[in-house]
Amino acid sequence: MALVVLGATLFTSESVLFPGESGMSRVASNIVVGIGFLGAGVIVRDRMQVSGVTTAAMIWCGAAIGIAIGRERYLVATIVALLTIVLLEAYWLSERVRARGAVTGAQGQPDR
C-alpha cells in the first residue's frame, strides 16, 4: 500500500515537467486507469463468494492519497488517509461482531 502511495506521489509531482495543466491531468488519469487494472486483478470470484474488494478499495484510496500529496494538497491527503483508516477499522469491527452473532445465535446461547 505504501508503495502505491509513493508511486502515485512521484508520478504526480513529476508531471510538472509536462507543460500546462493537461500534463498533470493526463498523469492522474493514467494512474487511475492503472490502479483500476490492479484492483480488478485483486478481486476474486469463487462460486458465490467475492473476495478482495476491500483490498482493491484500499489500493485505490492509496493512489488517490498519493495524487493528493503529489499535488501538494497535504490537508486533503491527511483527512482521506485518516478516514480510510477509520473505515477499515470499522469494517474489521463489524466483521467481528457479525461473526460473534453467528456463533451465539439469536438468543445469546451458543448454537448446537
Image: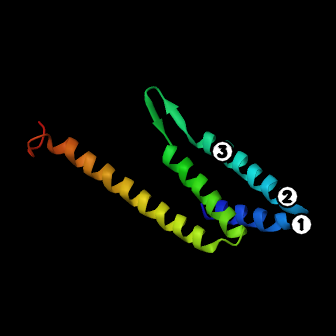
Q: CA distance from mark 1 to mark 3?
A: 25 Å
Which labelled disc corresponds to residue 47? none
Looking at the picture, tell me which residue is in the foreground, 8 or 24.
24
**What SS does tag 1 mark?**
helix
Q: Amino acid at mark 3?
A: Gly
Q: Earlier in the sequence, mark 1 or mark 3?
A: 1
Indicate whether 46 appears above or below 41.
above
Question: Which of pointers 3 and 2 indicates the residue nearer the eye?
Answer: 2
- Name the residue at 49% across, 48% down: 54
**What SS does tag 2 mark?**
helix
Q: CA distance from mark 1 to mark 2?
A: 8 Å
Q: Position of residue 92 (x, y in %)?
A: 37, 55
Q: Earlier in the sequence, mark 1 or mark 2?
A: 1
In the visual, does 44 lie left or right of 15?
left
In the visual, does 17 lie left or right of 10?
right
Q: Amino acid at mark 2?
A: Gly
Q: Are marks 1 and 2 in contact (CB under 8 Å)?
A: yes
- Name the residue at 77% across, 49% down: 30
Q: Which residue is mark 1?
A: 17
- Name the residue at 88% across, 62% down: 20
Q: Amino acid at mark 1?
A: Leu
Q: Which residue is mark 2?
A: 23
Q: Position of residue 71 (x, y in %)?
A: 72, 68
Residue furthest to the right in view is 19
Q: Position of residue 77 (x, y in %)?
A: 59, 68
In the visual, does 47 lie left or right of 74?
left
**What SS does tag 3 mark?**
helix
Q: Which residue is mark 3?
A: 36
Tell me the crowding category of disc 1: few under 14, some 14 to 19, or many 20 or more residues within 10 angstroms, Cα based.
Answer: few
